Amino acid sequence: MGDKVKKIKSMVKMEEDYATSLSASVEGLSNVVVRELLRSIAHDSQKHAGFYTAILNLMKSEGKALNDQEYDRLKSVIKEHIEVESRMVQEVEKLLAIEQDKRIKHIVTEIYEDEVRHHTLMKRLLEAVIRKEAILEEDVWDMIWRDVPGHGAPPG
């Protein structure tokens, strides 16, 4: 097993362990704001574990081709979610425009940025599904990082 595969596997485990630990540590907290912000971070760590798992699959070239029925279903599901994400972005923009409380505005901004990323990623996935092409490693990286400042490079 290559060093990169070992590293990615360790990242999956680290993210999963962190998500479990953080979720458990905030159970029963009476401060709803702190509890839910930390639970959201734990959820993101679980998401990161899923991303690392997808990376492992790309590294091992274990991707299974979709059949026509799966492509059609996936296309329909993604189109529906693109519409939902679009509405969510619009609603969050409305909230940002009227919110005065800086604490609330900060949280809403976090939500907005997530929604924009989700919407963009879903549109790129739809493009790949419509083309009925294998989603190659370059496609995935392009989908994830195309519009991110620094293209995913660490800041600094």
Image: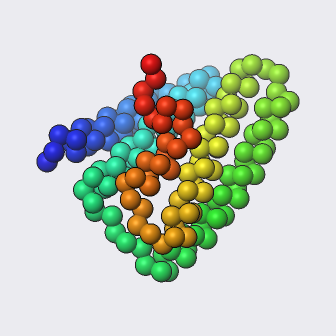
Q: How many marks?
A: 0
User: What residue is drawn where x is 22% and y is 41%?
Assistant: 4
Pick the quarter of the image with the C terminus.
top left
User: What residue is drawn where x is 16% and y is 45%?
Assistant: 2
Location of residue 15 with respect to 138 vertically, above or below: above
Location of residue 4 with respect to 70 vertically, above or below: above
User: What residue is drawn where x is 66% and y is 64%?
Assistant: 80
Give the camera-side residue of 57 and 19.
Answer: 57
Location of residue 98 with respect to 68 vertically, above or below: above
Residue 28 location in percent, x, y?
Answer: 53, 28
Give the camera-side residue of 62 and 108.
Answer: 62
Residue 20 found in image quarter:
top left
Residue 102 location in percent, x, y?
Answer: 74, 19
- Residue 117 in the figure: left or right of residue 97: left
In the rendered image, the residue lying farthest to the left is 1
Residue 154 location in percent, x, y?
Answer: 42, 27
